[in-house]
Amino acid sequence: MEGTFAELKRTSAVHSGPAPLGGAGGTGLTGGAGLGAEFGAGMLPVVPALRDLLPRGGLARGSVVAVPESGLLCLALMAEASADGAWCGIAGMPEAGIGAAVGLGLDPERTLLVPDPGTAWPQVVASLLDGCELVLVRPPVRASAQVRQRLEGTLRRGRGVLLVAGDWPGAQLRFQVAAQGWTGLGDGHGRLRECCAEVIVDGRGEAARAQARWIWLPAADGTVTLADPADIPASRTEFGGLRAVSGG
């Protein structure tokens, strides 16, 4: 699938329903006019729960951010910029339906969905980057060095951020879910209500020192917020032998 951003706007599945009221839609993800100015022209805002994990409190334009473990975390990273008026694109994640995206605060009228870009995914992503400030992609295969260089060049010429649901050697930032615990089950019955996750971020340059926070991802009411230490589940699953670090 090749084409310009304008062509993608015409052919992609774009939900035209109402945007979340007040930029948050009851999700607890705050945004709105003027927030982008707080971060400057070179940054895109993120929800408050994620700001302390990032060297400058937001996502630097022209950067690649890798999030291997969690599609939900990817959507949460897009929510604040979307609420602030940014165009967003999602490619290669058919399970990330518009309902899930809107539930986390994305503006459906400014979100382009390309569920299955196929083998032409690099061209699709390049076209989305031509007009979107945030593009989320799950590559169907590991990106070759040539593809990475081409898309990173597109990023440098533009003003967007590329979120990769997977591995991306050389990414400026890398998010990892080191551990998580669910609440809501008791004595073998009940419903999973909320997830408390330890999120670790490291990367290159000023992000070389890893930062960690426990975050409700999501809380029972759908919010993405910092977790109080007393609320961290005693029973939780550790992933990949990752070592917890102090956020400082």
Image: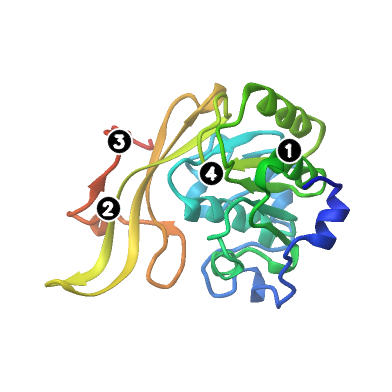
Secondary structure under tag 2 reads helix
**Earlier residue among tags 1 and 4:** 1
Asked whether the viewer can see residue 58, the reply is no
Q: Distance between the residues labelled 3 and 1?
A: 33 Å
In the image: residue 21, left or right of residue 179:
right
In the image: residue 217, left or right of residue 46:
left
Q: Report crowding for label 1: few under 14, some 14 to 19, many 20 or more residues within 10 A (C-alpha).
A: some
Location of residue 180 with respect to 10 vertically, above or below: above
The circle on residue 165 is 4
Mark count: 4
The circle on residue 42 is 1
Disc 4 marks a residue whose amino acid type is: Ala
Which residue occupies 74% across, 68% down?
Answer: 109
Q: Which residue lies under the disc numbered 2?
A: 229
Quadrant of residue 158 within the rendered picture:
top right
Disc 1 marks a residue whose amino acid type is: Gly
Asked whether the residues under the numbered discs 3 and 1 touch, taking CB atoms below 8 Å apart as contact, a structural biologist would say no
**Earlier residue among tags 4 and 3:** 4
Q: Which residue lies under the disc numbered 3?
A: 240
User: Which quadrant: the C terminus?
Assistant: top left
In the image: residue 99, left or right of residue 195:
right
Disc 2 marks a residue whose amino acid type is: Pro
Q: Residue 232's spot in the image, x, y percent?
A: 26, 55
Secondary structure under tag 1 reads loop
